[in-house]
Amino acid sequence: METFSSRLLQAAVEEFSRLPGIGKKTALRLVLHLLRQEKEDVIRFSEAISRLRQEVIYCTQCHNISDQALCEICRSPRRDNTVICVVEDIRDVIAIENTGQFHGLYHVLGGIISPMDGIGPNDLAIDSLQQRVEKNKETIQEVILALSTTMEGDTTNFYLFKKLKPYHVGISVIARGIAIGDDLEYADEVTLGRSIINRTPYQNSLTK
């Protein structure tokens, strides 16, 4: 166990080491780096983290991280509101946006159906997606299911297909340019972009 000459240093290292993928040695390097910075820079850093936790909210329409009731994507008149891309979490929104190949709207589920992890349909933002499609069924032409290519992702795709089928909107899935078992956030931008562009009707995937 590390011995620190300062309780303040020890407390800061312990807090940093709570972050995912950050061990005690990395945490110590980060804390010492901050100590070498100007006070104003460190204060600005801490204020940004504090404001993030206190002021960030979730978009009431798509559940993306936002500063206002509606996120910038949902508010933008330049987005194509006839297409909704359904993703697992906010990291997938960022990954798809970085491709520059999708210009529609999003819906963040907050996870995927995974009985082994105790996550069922009621734990996800599926009801709000269904209500959104029902409310805007005259406008929405396509729902893209852009979930991870895992058994849990496929299970969630099938569940969403059954839920949305009565509204007679096009339902598609991203092309299998993403390797089986991969998460979207780890795909390179070119591969992910092509998977969005080359998406296929969901019904086609049921026959394979």
Image (cartoon, rainbow, N blue to C red):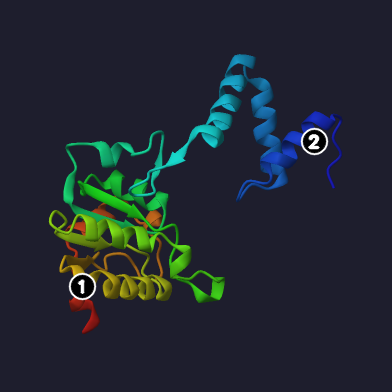
> Residue 199, percent across and down?
19, 64
Question: Measuring 41% from the left and 49% from the top, which residue is drawn there?
Answer: 90
Q: Are marks 1 and 2 in contact (CB under 8 Å)?
A: no
Residue 98 in percent (x, y) is at: 30, 44
Secondary structure of the residue carrying numbered label 1: helix
Q: How many marks?
A: 2
Look at the image and tell me whether residue 39 can be seen: yes
Category of crowding for the residue at label 1, using alpha-carbon neighbours closer than 10 angstroms: few (below 14), some (14–19), many (at least 20): few
Above or below: residue 201 compared with residue 97: below
Amino acid type for the residue under numbered disc 1: Pro
Q: In the drawing, what numbered circle is on residue 33?
A: none
* Disc ID at residue 166: 1
Of residues 55 and 32, the one drawn nearer to the viewer in this rendering = 55
Mark 2 closeness class: few <14, some 14–19, many ≥20 residues within 10 Å? some
Residue 195 in percent (x, y) is at 23, 61
Of circles 1 and 2, the one toward us is 1
Circle 2 residue: 10
Tell me the quarter of the image containing the C terminus: bottom left
Amino acid type at image mark 2:
Gln
At 64% from the left and 47% from the top, the residue drawn is: 22
Q: At 72% across and 45% down in the image, what residue appears?
A: 24
Front-lying residue, 111 or 35? 111
15 displayed left or right of 110 = right
